[in-house]
């Protein structure tokens, strides 16, 4: 099985392990054999993945007391749900040597990781992400948490999963819009560090878009998709290894996100349905526009990035005014003393962090 290691000052703190469900089942059984009990939190939409996995694991796991099945949504990504998971862990006898295993998208892994981090001051946990977004971003790097008072991910901790298992096979039936949401984060990673993968990812996603039968395309191009996921996880693992707690370089992973969070906040208030990846895609185009205005990117770069994201099928037009975005940005949890760490992009592999007040960004973008 292919492994990507995440380090902190030379020590391995987490790993992403890619393989088939069969291989993952065997590895999970091996890992969990050191624990008193294995507790599974699973998104309701992917209980079939849990069933397939546990049919493979068979008797190999220690006491596995049922499953906590979650209806995952931003609305129930709350402390209440995390406490429900903790309550269930208590009822099912989890002790300090138990292990929690989460199966689902980023909402599930964020909440399960948070619950595992606070239950008895922290128990072992691992993830099997089932969306492209969670595979390339959410489930790697240790960010856990919940929304609070309409602010996204306001409460949480950074604590690394022991292992994130990556399996491209589980993505075959992911709805197109969810897949695209992950494609946006993947493209973001390759804009940060290209390594020849940016063009490869855009080409792959554009071909998928024009394929008559998406599922057949994904099955016949699984190796290419796995390689792209692996490369994207590699980018993130490298950055997290150098700056786990986001005091510098990790901020680059927020490319497009300053705008995206403001778009998502406005969308919630306006009752518009915009996915995280769609907002990130629009945000990356806006980051390129800002880069042009500051002189970091060449004139016209934002237009070419927009065309590439359009070719993939991503959203690229912002439904809100710059002023509406800036008002939301001022309240973003990442705004420090009125200053925002904007990530500017000038091309694949060309990003830089520029600290700027929201009003200055608004002036430049108007
Ligand atoms: N999703 C950005 C990060 O993990 O830092």
Image: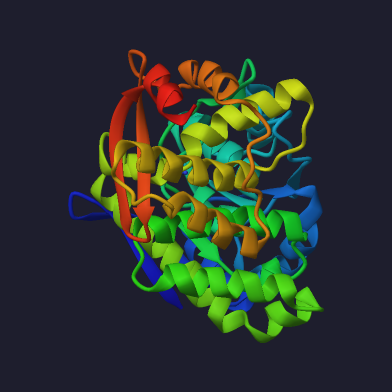
Image coordinates of residue 274 in percent, x first then y, are: 71, 39
Q: Residue at x 70, y 54 (%)?
A: 178
Counting labels gives 0
Q: In the depicted view, which residue is nearer to us: 214 or 107? A: 214
Of 366 and 354, which appears nearest the observer? Answer: 366
Where ligand 1 lies, by quadrant?
Answer: top left
Residue 354 x, y percent position in the rendering: 29, 34
Examine the image and state in which quarter residue 54 appears. Answer: bottom right
Nearest the viewer among 190 and 125 is 190
**Residue reaching furthest to the bottom:** 220
- Horizontal side, residue 283 vs residue 236: left or right: right
Relative vertical location of residue 90 with respect to residue 352 in this rendering, above or below: above
Quarter residue 287 falls in: top left
318 shown above or below 267: below
Q: How is the image coloured?
A: rainbow
Query: In the rendered view, would you say 265 is above or below 239?
Result: above
- Looking at the picture, how far across and down is residue 164, in whole percent? 49, 58
Give percent across and percent down for residue 113. 53, 41
Q: Quadrant of residue 245?
A: top left
Residue beneath the point at 51% across and 68% down: 229
Q: Which residue is found at the position 63% from the left and 23% from the top? A: 79
Is residue 166 among the parts visible in the rendering? yes
Q: Nearer the viewer, residue 198 or 119?
A: 198
**Residue at x 57%, y 53% (from the top left corner):** 134
Q: Is residue 290 above or below residue 174?
A: above
Q: In the displayed image of the protein, which residue is found farthest to the left? A: 9
């Amino acid at each position: 099985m292919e492994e990507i290691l995440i380090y902190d000052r030379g020590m391995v703190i987490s790993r992403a392990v890619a393989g088939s469900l069969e291989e993952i089942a065997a590895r999970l059984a091996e890992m969990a054999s050191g624990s008193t009990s294995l507790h599974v939190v699973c998104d309701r939409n992917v209980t079939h993945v849990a069933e397939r996995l546990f049919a493979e694991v068979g008797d190999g796991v220690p006491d596995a007391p049922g499953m906590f099945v979650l209806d995952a949504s931003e609305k129930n990504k709350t402390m209440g749900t995390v406490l429900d998971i903790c309550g269930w862990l208590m009822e099912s006898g989890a002790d300090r040597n138990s292990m929690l295993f989460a199966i689902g998208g980023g909402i599930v892994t964020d909440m399960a990781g948070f619950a595992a981090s606070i239950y008895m001051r922290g128990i072992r946990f691992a993830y099997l992400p089932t969306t492209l977004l969670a595979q390339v971003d959410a489930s790697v790097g240790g960010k856990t948490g919940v929304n609070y008072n309409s602010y996204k991910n306001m409460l949480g901790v950074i604590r690394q999963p022991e292992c994130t298992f990556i399996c491209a096979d589980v993505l075959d039936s992911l709805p197109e819009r969810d897949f695209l949401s992950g494609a946006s984060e993947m493209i973001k990673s390759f804009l940060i560090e290209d390594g020849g993968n940016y063009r490869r990812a855009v080409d792959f996603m554009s071909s998928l878009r024009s394929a008559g039968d998406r599922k057949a395309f994904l099955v016949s191009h699984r190796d290419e998709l796995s390689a792209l996921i692996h490369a994207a996880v590699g980018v993130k693992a490298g950055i997290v290894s150098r700056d786990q707690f986001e005091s510098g370089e990790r901020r680059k992973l927020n490319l497009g996100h300053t705008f995206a969070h403001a778009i998502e906040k406005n969308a919630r208030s306006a009752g518009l349905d915009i996915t995280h990846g769609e907002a990130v895609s629009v945000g990356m185009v806006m980051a390129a526009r800002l880069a042009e205005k500051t002189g970091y990117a060449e004139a016209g770069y934002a237009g070419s990035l927009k065309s590439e994201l359009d070719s993939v099928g991503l959203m690229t037009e912002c439904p809100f005014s710059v002023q509406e975005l800036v008002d939301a940005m001022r309240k973003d949890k990442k705004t420090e003393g009125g200053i925002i760490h904007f990530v500017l992009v000038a091309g694949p592999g060309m990003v830089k962090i520029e600290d700027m007040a929201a009003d200055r960004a608004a002036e430049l973008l108007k």
